[in-house]
Amino acid sequence: MLVIGVGNPLMSDDGVGQRLLEALAARAAPGDSVEFLDAGTLGFMLLPHVEQCDALLALDAASVGGVPGELRVFEGAEFDEFVRQPRCSVHELGLHDLIDAARLTGALPAR
């Protein structure tokens, strides 16, 4: 399993992905087959990590119309739909770009 913390801690609450990543990594049991990766503002350099994982957990701040700090979980097709929304990501490269690239290489199943 790959857990990525997405965001930019210099942009206020956009760094919540990294904070959550740190908290989860600190609680991980020795021997767990989990890779924790600070993804920052993303980039195609993450593609090999995504291609090789069996499961992906992406932690990021998002404007979803809820109250600050509200947790939302998006899985499968719902995740794909969410990350493709206009202005979903303020990062140079969005999660949807990374997922699409992994699908193009055959590492992830097509949707």
Image (cartoon, helix red, strand yellow):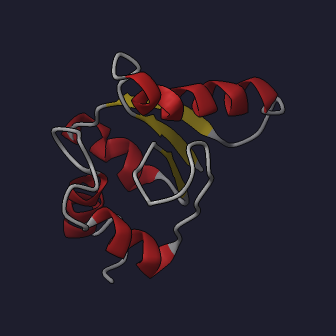
Q: Residue at x 57, y 51 (%)?
A: 67
Q: Residue at x 65, y 41 (%)?
A: 34
- Report x, y in % for residue 63: 40, 52
Is residue 37 something one can see in this rendering? no
Q: Residue at x 54, y 46 (%)?
A: 2
From what the image shows, is residue 67 above or below residue 61?
below
- Report x, y in % for residue 107: 34, 64
From what the image shows, is residue 34 above or below residue 16?
below
Tell which of 3 and 41 is nearer to you. 41
Q: Residue at x 24, y 50 (%)?
A: 94
Q: Seen in the image, is 101 located left or right of residue 109?
A: left
Tell which of 70 and 109 is nearer to you. 70
Residue lying farthest to the top in this orientation: 10
> How many marks do you count on the picture?
0
Is residue 62 something one can see in this rendering? yes
Q: Quadrant of residue 31?
A: top right
Q: Seen in the image, is 35 located left or right of residue 91?
A: right
Tell which of 16 and 2 is nearer to you. 16
From what the image shows, is residue 52 above or below residue 85?
above
Residue lying farthest to the right in this orientation: 29
- Report x, y in % for residue 99: 30, 60
The C terminus sits in image quarter: bottom left
- Report x, y in % for residue 18: 51, 27
